[in-house]
Image (cartoon, helix red, strand yellow):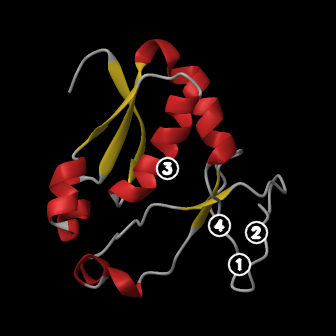
Amino acid sequence: MNDNFKILAVFEYSTEAHVTKSRLDADGFETMLMDEKTIDTDPLVSNAIGGVKLLVHKNDFEKAALVYQEIRTYQKDAQGNEMACPNCKSNKILVAEAQRKNIFYMLFPFFEKTRHICNDCKTIF
């Protein structure tokens, strides 16, 4: 990876990364994608190699991060309504990373309950 770039976001598929990259490019940020072609060739390896990485020039990273926080999609409940953080009442909710604390969840990750994290106060619920 080029030392002049930092990873802004990671996406499971390249199409998601291209949408965000296009917006940042339109705003004048210097961006590039990493591992895009590998995942396009075989989408099943996305989790194994860590997804498609969206890189932004390190001089513009903070400004690009602010734009990304405004345009990214956040979680909704089963009825399609915005979710709210129980701590700060923010509606910027993401899916929290799986913990897989024991061997059962490592072998059968689909049994682990989905947890959410607030993008503002970082409360996990």
Residue 41 lies, in percent from the top left, at 15, 62
Residue at which label 2 appears: 83
Three-letter code, disc 3: Val
Asked if disc 1 and disc 2 are in contact, CB closer than 8 Å, the reply is yes
Three-letter code, disc 4: Gln
Res 20 visible? yes
Asked if disc 3 and disc 1 are in contact, CB closer than 8 Å, the reply is no
Sequence-first disc among 1 and 2? 1
Gap in angstroms between the C-alphas marked 3 and 1: 23 Å
Asked if disc 1 and disc 4 are in contact, CB closer than 8 Å, the reply is yes
Asked if disc 4 and disc 3 are in contact, CB closer than 8 Å, the reply is no
Residue at which label 3 appears: 19
Relative horizontal placement of residue 106, taking residue 85 as reference (left or right)? left
Residue at which label 4 appears: 75
Judge the density around disc 4: few (<14), some (14-19), many (≥20) Cα neighbours within 10 Å.
some
Residue at which label 1 appears: 77
Gap in angstroms between the C-alphas marked 1 and 2: 6 Å
Judge the density around disc 1: few (<14), some (14-19), many (≥20) Cα neighbours within 10 Å.
few
Residue 56 lies, in percent from the top left, at 42, 27
Sequence-first disc among 4 and 3? 3
Gap in angstroms between the C-alphas marked 2 and 4: 7 Å
* Nearer to us in this view, 113 or 35: 35
From the viewer's perspective, is residue 63 above or below residue 121? above
* Nearer to us in this view, 80 or 103: 80
Sequence-first disc among 2 and 4? 4
Farthest top residue? Answer: 59
Asked if disc 2 and disc 4 are in contact, CB closer than 8 Å, the reply is yes
Three-letter code, disc 2: Met
Determine the image quadrant of residue 16.
bottom left
Gap in angstroms between the C-alphas marked 1 and 4: 7 Å
Relative horizontal placement of residue 86, taking residue 108 as reference (left or right)? right
Gap in angstroms between the C-alphas marked 3 and 2: 24 Å
